[in-house]
Every structure is written in structure tokens, then in C-alpha cells.
């Protein structure tokens, strides 16, 4: 995929880009965050790094132009302590949501049984043993990669783009990175089948 064409279109939509990541930066980022960029994301970020969404408008005629910058894209080559913490928290959010859900359902026998069953945990064991099983399950989940806001992709090539705001109901935002960018920012008509996609839990998607 030639991402230069898409990046030029994104720039026309107001997305600000910096120079793409270098080989050294890719290596540093992957080691720092314990992730591996899928091929298409790596190609995109090598061509250009989106680091801000820019909007500009005049509130009233004659008034000074108002400019607003927001940063919903991960700034991968900002290695400041503050930004590293931000991206680590961003990456960890799906697992954190899973942990919170696990703790929340412990006091409800029916919900806890269902939750354990979904994860393949043995509900008949003692709570201490189930806790250990859950820790193992959680540690085996690979990190998801933030793309924009609550949008994530998996580490494998041709990953779908997922909206992850809670563990038990995720939405499909693109069949792959190109499809997502065109639908999110370039006015491509979203596939009606996305709304019918039964993806279940994000951790189920990981194991498909």
C-alpha cells in the first residue's frame, strides 16, 4: 500500500504530520513498549507521523483566528517521561479494563461463573487458584497498539481496527488500517456489515 497518497489526503483534512519514524526509532519504540508494529502500520508511520489534529476557524467576523490542536494520535518518537507514561497507560488500558471487570464480578456468583467460563478459567477451583489462572491469562495477552483515541489494532499483519472502551463489547472501525483511515478521516462510506459484526470480547479477537 502506498501511504503517501493517503497522507497527502489526510493533510488536506487538517491532520498535521511530522517526519516518519526511522529504523532506530521503530526499534526503540518496540522495545520500550513491548510491541511489534504490523507491516502496514510500520509502512504508514515510516512515511509520516500524525501528531495532531488541527482545526481553525473565526468565531465572529473580524475577530482573531482561533486555532486548536488536539493530540489523539500516539506521538511515538517523543521519549519524554510524561509521554512514555501516557502511551504505556494507553497500551495497558484494555488489560486494565479486563482486570477491573474481573474484580467487579467476583461478588456475583452468576456473573463470575460466566466471566470465568468466557476466559476458560476453572470456576470450581478456590478463588486463590482462579486468581492465579487469571494472572496467567492476562499475562499471555499481547499488547494492543493505539492508533487514534480509543482505536486499537493487533500486532499481526492485516489486523482489523477495533474500538475498545470496555471488555465485553467492541466495535469494528475498519477491516484493516487503510480501510480505517479512509472511513475515519476521508469520508469513505462505512461498510454496513461492520454494525452487524459480532466480535464479542477484544481478547477473543486476539485468539482468533
Image (tube, helix red, strand yellow):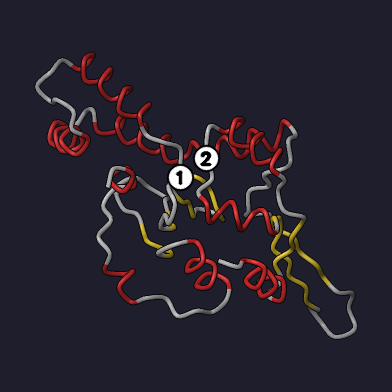
Q: Residues within 10 Å of mark 1 (few under 14, many from 20)?
A: some
Secondary structure beneath label 1: loop
Q: In the picture provided, is 184 more to the left or to the right than 203?
A: right
Q: Give me the residue at 52% from left, 52% from top.
A: 39
Confirm or deny contact between disc 1 and disc 2 (CB under 8 A).
Answer: yes
Secondary structure beneath label 2: loop
Q: In the rendering, at what x and y percent does residue 180 appear?
A: 49, 66
Q: Give me the residue at 18% from left, 28% from top.
A: 121
The residue nearer to you, when weighing 19 against 23, is: 23
Q: In the rendering, at what x and y percent does residue 86 appear?
A: 63, 38
Taking the view exactly as shown, the residue that stands out farthest to the bottom is 61
Q: Nearer the N terminus, badge 1 or badge 2?
A: 2
- The numbered disc on residue 36 is 2
Answer yes or no: is residue 162 visible. no
Read off the residue under disc 1: 155
Q: In the picture provided, is 43 more to the left or to the right than 157?
A: right
Amino acid at each position: 500500500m502506498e501511504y503517501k497518497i493517503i497522507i497527502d489526503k489526510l493533510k488536506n483534512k487538517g491532520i498535521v504530520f511530522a517526519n516518519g519514524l526511522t529504523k532506530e526509532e521503530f526499534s526503540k519504540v518496540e522495545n520500550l513498549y513491548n510491541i511489534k508494529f504490523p507491516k502496514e502500520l510500520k509502512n504508514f508511520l515510516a512515511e509520516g507521523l500524525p501528531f495532531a489534529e488541527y482545526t481553525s476557524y473565526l468565531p465572529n467576523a473580524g475577530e482573531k483566528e482561533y486555532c486548536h490542536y488536539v493530540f489523539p494520535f500516539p506521538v511515538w518518537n517523543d521519549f519524554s517521561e510524561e509521554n512514555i507514561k501516557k502511551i504505556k497507560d494507553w497500551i495497558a488500558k484494555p488489560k486494565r479494563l479486563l482486570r477491573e471487570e474481573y474484580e467487579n464480578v467476583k461478588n456475583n456468583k452468576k456473573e463470575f461463573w460466566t466471566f470465568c467460563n468466557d476466559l476458560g478459567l476453572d470456576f470450581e477451583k478456590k478463588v486463590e487458584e482462579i486468581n492465579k489462572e487469571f494472572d496467567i491469562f492476562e499475562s499471555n495477552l499481547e499488547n494492543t497498539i493505539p492508533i487514534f483515541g480509543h482505536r486499537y489494532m493487533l500486532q499481526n499483519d492485516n489486523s482489523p481496527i477495533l474500538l475498545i472502551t470496555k471488555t465485553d463489547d467492541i466495535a469494528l472501525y475498519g477491516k484493516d488500517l487503510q480501510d480505517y483511515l479512509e472511513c475515519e478521516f476521508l469520508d469513505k462510506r462505512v461498510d454496513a456489515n461492520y454494525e452487524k459484526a459480532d466480535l464479542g470480547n477484544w481478547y477473543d479477537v486476539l485468539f482468533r
